[in-house]
Amino acid sequence: MNIRQSILTALLLVAAPTFALAANAANAPAAVAATPATANTEAGIAWFDGDVDAAFAYAKAHNKPLFLYWGATWCPPCNEVKATIFNRKDFIQRSSFFVPVHIDGDSPGAQKLGARFKVSGYPTTILFKADGTEITRLPGEVDAKRYLQTLGLAMNANHPVKDILKSALTGGKLSEDEWRMLAYYSWDTDEQQLVSNKDLQATLQKLAKASPAGDNAKRLALSALVAATNPKTGDPASVDKAAATKLLSSVLTNPHAARDNVDLLSGYPTELVGLVTAVNTPARAQLTATWDKALSRLDADTTLSKADRISALAAKVSLARLEKPEGALSPALQNEVRKQVAIVDKTTTNPFERHAVIDASADVLAKAGLLDDSDNLLKAELKTSHSPYYLMLGLAANAKTRGDKAAAISWYEQAYQAAQGPATRLQWGVTYLSNLIDLAPQDETRIEKVSSSVFQELGQTQNAFYERNRSSLEKLGRKLTAWKTTGHHDASFGRVQAQLNGVCSKLPAADAQRTTCQGLLTPAKV
């Protein structure tokens, strides 16, 4: 998944209600007297106005489920959720039956809360019982109708999905609704709460076999195939390729089944085709043709969101490049891409939906080899976007593809300078610095200067060493350590390390963050 698709992740709703920022849980008051926000509730969702612990206390006192949404202003999928789900009248009406809580990834203590609730990718939505028990994680990549159906099942469920999974794996009798909860559970954002990454494929395979034949079994089997494509934890050798090809063909040729699984079919086309067929074989050609036809139907399906339709178009481009990744696409497909992008650009006026579809459109143009078109689309959007710094990463990626290192570095720098919010600025700074090391490792002065800027902001950020921040910093630490080792930049690295040590020394000795901080630029022991 590229950086434009980061769950990879919202300050305002389409309906313009007031957002409450989640406070640091460590400082949360224990008072139960907190009440939901009342300002602008007639315009949208009455997001809870108070800290997370107060929200759970309120939910328990009023015997209501709690709906937790974790997102970020710049995240395209988050903007898509806001534009297609959160602004729906039926969702807003349903929200009165639970306590809706929004955690913006840049709010104070948000990354620490992310670690507490085991959420990393944006967006993640979790439904809890009134007593705080997690019921399920809702899939952010399915369409609005399916999302609301899944939410309804979860709100009426007798058992949390954790217990349902245990029963399913031990031969228990499940209702159709319980199987559907498993089939549409957000395995992508599970964060190993239910199943470890190494066991996910086998678990999904077992569930698919145990589930009664039908849509749920197909969804689980498809999810198992996706898990098999994971290069770190998947086991492609265990896949029955003939049976998998038959399954894929049956879903692709069934318009209802294809639409229900559009997220999987558009998200992993080349991975799945590569999993079950060999290079340059009739079987691959046939499956690719079947897939392309299904994607054309999805791309033309006006009941799908524009982002979903653009994703289907992007999948067509990916499949066309499967056997010739560096080759030119057919003029017909390139013209189709231009035409579809022009339509969504002209017809999309909602700013949140635009952020999602323009990002996806720029990405598909780039994949189609139309880099100039992609640049033009992104540059035009910079003037009105609420998160132009995110779009700048697309311009940097395009320049990088061209081999224009100077332009790529310039866009990464501009993106960092324009980024807003402590977590976002930290992550954008890491992205800029990492690419600077890759593209201009000899520019020691600039690398040291940017490192100093990132670590200075790091020292000013409360609870900076949690969740997404921690992951970004650990990657940066490995990158800087490798740069020192391979480029003989000992003096510069030493000054950067000294600055980081100063940040670490200000953390309390008993704080786990201090250990994380101290280990960032320390080579791992072999």
Image (cartoon, rainbow, N blue to C red):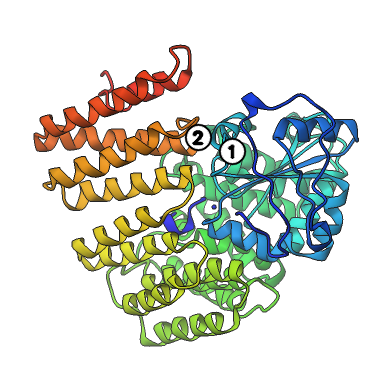
Q: Residue at x 59, y 43 (%)?
A: 189
Give the crowd class for mark 1: few <14, some 14-19, many >=20 residues within 10 Å: many
Where residue 2 sits: x, y (%)?
A: 41, 56
Q: Quadrant of residue 154?
A: top right
Amino acid type assigned to the residue bearing label 1 in the image: Val
Q: Which residue is mark 1?
A: 119
Q: Residue at x 9, y 34 (%)?
A: 488
Instruction: Tell me the number on the disc at residue 169.
Output: none
Where residue 309 sits: x, y (%)?
A: 58, 73
The answer to the question of whether label 1 and label 2 lie on touching residues, with beta carbons closer than 8 A, is yes
Q: Which residue is mark 2?
A: 467
Side of 269 where 100 appears, left or right: right
- Can the viewer see residue 381 in this picture? yes
Q: Residue at x 36, y 70 (%)?
A: 321
In this rendered view, identify the residue nearer to me: 376 or 186.
376
- Can the viewer see residue 171 in this picture? no
Amino acid type assigned to the residue bearing label 2 in the image: Glu
Residue furthest to the left in view is: 488
Question: Does 83 sit above or below residue 489?
Answer: below
Q: Quadrant of residue 14?
A: bottom right
Q: Secondary structure at mark 2?
A: helix
Is the N terminus in the top left, top right, bottom left or bottom right quadrant?
bottom left
Side of 494 where 432 appears, left or right: right
Is the C terminus in the top left, top right, bottom left or bottom right quadrant?
top left
Q: Secondary structure at mark 1?
A: loop
Q: Residue at x 64, y 25 (%)?
A: 27
Where residue 442 sits: x, y (%)?
A: 11, 47
In this rendered view, identify the residue nearer to me: 167 or 60.
60
Question: Does 424 sit above or below residue 203?
Answer: below
Question: Does 63 sit above or below residue 231?
Answer: above
Where residue 456 sits: x, y (%)?
A: 33, 36
